[in-house]
């Protein structure tokens, strides 16, 4: 802050026709009038954070949300096998999966917006320790008016200058919202790269766009580099949040928080890194994603979890026995169930079996689910 005051004073002197260092316009008496480093620096932190979030990260998240929502609609007719604990579970539509991803991004945006509300409260006007010594009672209000005119940031004077200067809770909350967004993005990027694993020996339910040669030794290999790039950016964000949290914890003593430089540096760098990674991930990965319908159908038919929809019709134990037999004999649930229908072991018609094993019907609640009689 003192350096900025000196630069401004010297530039003002030049404009007034005076040499630098003349101090006709004094860095303290004039430029710093009504201010202190202790309220100016945290105010600058808040303004910069709001500007970066609004100008960089939130537009990137909006772009990703739109891309994921579009894929949710495009993939909604594709049924895939669900997975819990990394094991086969009941079917789910690929569109439902991507709608969940889109909702995660929307929630991340809302959490960041909530953090912005806290950052709009500025410490300016508290001067040295929050008391407002050596400033005019209307100074903070006027500063906020000018800032809002220049930035449209909806800034306002802090309700309590002692909290605003002595603590950095609003900044910690913003870093936490940024961390939560990164955690959500890790989930999305990791899922997509796993669903695209293969092409022949992995899951292979998604087809990821090729953006570069994948290997210097294995011809034709395509790696999920856009997913991995985002994952690394998110790891950096988690580290930045840790730095902000530790600085807030260890360096905020009495009437001045001395950890502001490291907090501001890590937060603003994290916003820039994450915004860039999200933009690249949206444009070079999500927008070009395709679904492998044949692979999804193949895995659905092979899954032993298909017996889940038989449980309301024949009971849990009978359905589990079908799954066990299918596994032991290398058959599908449908094949074993058909054999047991023909042998009279289970009392279902072929039509009932076909409806029960329709994977599309398994992706929504049904009013036909009733306890098995007896």
Image (cartoon, rainbow, N blue to C red):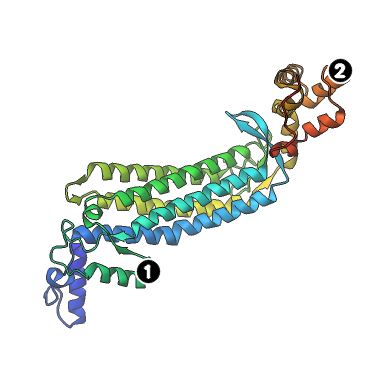
Q: Which residue is mark 2?
A: 344
Residue 151 is labelled as 1
Instruction: Let me know if residue 284 appears in the view.
Output: yes
Q: Quadrant of residue 367?
A: top right
Residue at horizontal 20 percent and vertical 77 percent from the top: 12
Instruction: Let me know if residue 287 appears in the view.
Output: no
Residue at horizontal 14 percent and vertical 76 percent from the top: 25
Q: Is residue 280 above or below residue 241?
A: below
The answer to whether 301 appears left or right of 28 in the picture is right
Give SS at disc 1: helix
Say which of 88 and 278 sits in front. 88
Q: Is residue 131 above or below residue 144?
A: above
Q: Quadrant of residue 224?
A: top right
Give SS at disc 2: loop
Placement of the N terminus among the 4 image quadrants: bottom left
Say which of 214 and 267 sits in front. 267
Residue 38, x across and y down, in percent: 20, 57
Mark 2 vs mark 1, CA separation in Å: 76 Å
Q: Label 2 neighbourhood size at 10 Å, few (<14), some (14-19), many (20+)?
A: few
């Amino acid at each position: 802050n003192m350096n900025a005051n000196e630069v401004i004073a010297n530039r003002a002197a030049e404009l007034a026709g005076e040499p630098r260092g003349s101090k006709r316009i004094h860095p303290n008496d004039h430029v710093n009038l009504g201010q202190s480093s202790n309220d100016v620096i945290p105010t600058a932190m808040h303004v910069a954070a709001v500007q970066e979030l609004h100008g960089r990260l939130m537009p990137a998240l909006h772009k990703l949300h739109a891309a994921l929502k579009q894929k949710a609609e495009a993939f909604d007719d594709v049924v895939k096998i669900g997975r819990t604990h990394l094991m086969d579970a009941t079917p789910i539509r690929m569109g439902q999966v991507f709608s969940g991803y889109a909702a995660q991004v929307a929630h991340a945006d809302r959490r960041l917006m909530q953090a912005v509300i806290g950052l709009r409260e500025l410490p300016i006007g508290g001067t040295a320790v929050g008391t407002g010594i050596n400033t005019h009672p209307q100074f903070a209000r006027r500063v906020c008016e000018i800032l809002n005119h220049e930035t449209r940031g909806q800034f306002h004077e802090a309700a309590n200058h002692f909290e605003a200067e002595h603590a950095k809770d609003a900044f910690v909350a913003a870093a936490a919202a940024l961390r939560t967004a990164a955690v959500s993005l890790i989930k999305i990027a990791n899922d997509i790269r796993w669903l695209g694993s293969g092409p022949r020996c992995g899951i292979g339910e998604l087809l990821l766009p090729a953006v570069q040669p994948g290997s210097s030794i294995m011809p034709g290999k395509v790696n999920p580099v856009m997913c991995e790039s985002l994952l690394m950016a998110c790891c950096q964000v988690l580290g930045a949040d840790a730095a902000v949290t530790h600085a807030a914890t260890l360096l905020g003593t009495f009437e001045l928080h001395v950890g502001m430089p490291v907090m501001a540096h890590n937060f603003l760098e994290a916003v820039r890194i994450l915004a860039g990674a999200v933009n690249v991930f949206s444009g070079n990965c999500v927008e070009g994603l395709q679904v492998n319908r044949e692979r999804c159908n193949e895995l659905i038919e092979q899954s032993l979890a298909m017996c889940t929809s038989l449980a309301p019709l024949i009971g849990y134990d009978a359905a589990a026995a079908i799954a066990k037999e299918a596994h032991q004999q290398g058959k599908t649930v449908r094949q074993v169930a058909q054999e047991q229908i023909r042998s009279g072991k289970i009392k279902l018609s072929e039509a009932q079996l076909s409806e029960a094993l329709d994977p599309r019907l398994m992706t929504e609640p049904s009013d036909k689910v009733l306890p098995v009689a007896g």
